[in-house]
Each structure stands twice: as C-alpha cells, then as structure tokens.
C-alpha cells in the first residue's frame, strides 16, 4: 500500500484539523496515511514517501508556524534533493494581511520546488476572510485533486 504523508504547519490547530478531515479521503483512495504535526526532515526522507500533502497555516507577517520551522530550516540547510517527491499543498491564510496572504504556504512551496519536488496541480489557498472552516474548501479540493491527478490506487 503506498504511503501518503501529511505534514502540518499550524499555530492554533486549523491546519491539523484539515489534515485529519482529508485523511479518510486518501485512505479510501488506497493510501496508508501518516500525519506529522511536529514534522522533521527525517519524516520526509527517512522512509519511503509515495506522495506528500502539506497543510500549512500562515502566522505573523507571512511566517511559518513554529512547529514546522525546524523542518523548513533543515530542508533549506541540508538541501537533500527531492526529485522523486510528488506533493500537494494546502495553504491557510487571511487576505486582510495583503501581500503576506498564505505566505508560509507559498514559501514552503518554493522551498520544495527548489529541491526538485514536483507539485501536482495548483496549490489551494484558503482565505479565512471568505471561508470560516478551512475543511469546507479543502475536502472538495482533495477529492478533485485525487481524481484529476489520478492518485487513486485502490
């Protein structure tokens, strides 16, 4: 059974809630799913990752939440090269912050692409000004992502 790893960057639990809500969709599609709410680079590269999903909220002025900072720092410093990694990204933000809207997700996306990882499809950016519960937008996006990217294995 292929492994999907969901990496969470969250301050108040919203991104973790999204990860927990979308997990059954991937299980139905035939994946073994692991959620990492204190992710490390070793969680990504230490064992096979067939597919990754990043659920990341933005804090401060476009900053990464503290729980995912060590992951991003190690990714940048160690430059492991992620040419075989296929991933999706759900970024949570608030458009009232202007230019820094979904800044953490956008930054992480650039970091992953810079290491050679391949994003499948477009990044989902959920705006707290328009969507009260992020999973209301994330669930249909994941269903469509699985379908369009032909990720179903079961």
Image (cartoon, rainbow, N blue to C red):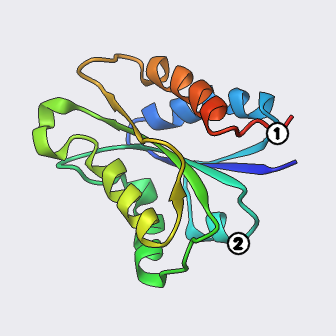
Instruction: Give the crowd class for mark 1: few <14, some 14-19, many >=20 residues within 10 Å.
Output: few
Instruction: Give the crowd class for mark 2: few <14, some 14-19, many >=20 residues within 10 Å.
Output: few
Q: Residue at x 13, y 44 (%)?
A: 99
Q: Report which residue position mark 1 lands on.
A: 153
Q: Residue at x 17, y 49 (%)?
A: 61
Q: Residue at x 76, y 64 (%)?
A: 48
* SS at mark 2 in the image: loop
Number of numbered discs on residues: 2
Residue 76 pos. (x, y %): 41, 76
* SS at mark 1 in the image: loop
Residue closest to the eye, 103 or 115: 115
Residue 83 pos. (x, y %): 58, 71
Q: Is residue 36 above or below residue 24?
A: below
Q: How many angstroms separate mark 1 from mark 2 (CA)? A: 23 Å
Residue 64 pos. (x, y %): 33, 54
Judged left or right of residue 38, residue 125 is: left
Foreground: disc 1 or disc 2: 1
Q: Which mark is residue 22?
A: none
Q: Which mark is residue 46?
A: 2
């Amino acid at each position: 059974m292929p492994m999907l790893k969901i990496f969470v960057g969250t301050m108040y639990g919203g991104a973790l809630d999204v990860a927990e809500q979308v997990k059954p969709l991937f299980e139905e599609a035939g994946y073994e799913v692991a959620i990492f709410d204190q992710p490390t680079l070793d969680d990504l590269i230490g064992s096979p990752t067939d597919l990754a999903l990043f659920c990341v909220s933005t804090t401060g002025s476009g900053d990464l939440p503290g729980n995912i900072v060590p992951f991003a720092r190690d990714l940048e410093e160690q430059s492991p090269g992620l040419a075989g990694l296929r991933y999706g990204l759900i970024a949570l933000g608030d458009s009232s912050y202007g230019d820094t809207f979904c800044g953490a997700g956008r930054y992480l996306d650039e970091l992953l692409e810079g290491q050679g990882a391949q994003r499948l499809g477009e990044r989902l950016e959920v705006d707290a000004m328009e969507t009260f519960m992020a999973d209301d937008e994330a669930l249909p996006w994941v269903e469509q992502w699985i379908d369009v990217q032909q990720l179903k294995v079961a």
